[in-house]
Image: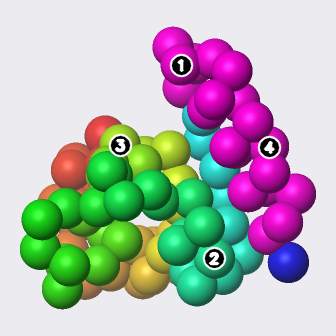
Amino acid sequence: MDADAIFMYKTIEKKFRNVSIVTELASMNTMSFLVSEQDQPGNKNAGYFASKPFAAGEIFVGSLLNSLMCQSYYNDKIMDILD
């Protein structure tokens, strides 16, 4: 499902190191194809949320936006953090 996005991310990342890439994935499971071993944190239990591309905002999953929107109703400080 995310094959085109993964291919483009990897191609741009390899050819243009200084370019910021933002990629939306349809499934969290496909993030493992984008994160290399060197990007993974020392603690493997932390998951992909602690990986360099995800933490830098280069990779996001659409369902996370829904969660953030719902949480911002209960916690208005989330919008300040995102800004």
Residue carrying label 2: 30
Pick whichever of labels 2 and 4 is earlier in the sequence: 4
Figure quadrant of residue 11:
top right
Figure quadrant of residue 77:
bottom left
Q: What type is the residue that disc 4 sits on?
A: Met
- Per the model, the C-alpha gap separating discs 3 and 2 is 18 Å
Pick whichever of labels 3 and 2 is earlier in the sequence: 2
Query: Residue 36's x, y, as percent?
Result: 45, 56
Query: Residue 40's x, y, as percent?
Result: 29, 61
Asked if residue 25 lies left or right of residue 3, the reply is left
Classify mark 4: helix, strand or loop: helix
Query: Residue 43's x, y, as percent?
Result: 12, 74
- Per the model, the C-alpha gap separating discs 3 and 1 is 14 Å
Residue carrying label 1: 17
Residues in magenta? Answer: 2-20
- Graded by Cα atoms within 10 Å as few (under 14), some (14 to 19) or many (20 or more), the crowding at tag 3 reads few
Pick whichever of labels 3 and 4 is earlier in the sequence: 4
Cβ–Cβ under 8 Å for marks 3 and 2 = no
Query: Residue 74's x, y, as percent?
Result: 25, 83
- Per the model, the C-alpha gap separating discs 3 and 4 is 18 Å
In the rendered view, tell whether residue 60 sits above or below residue 48.
above
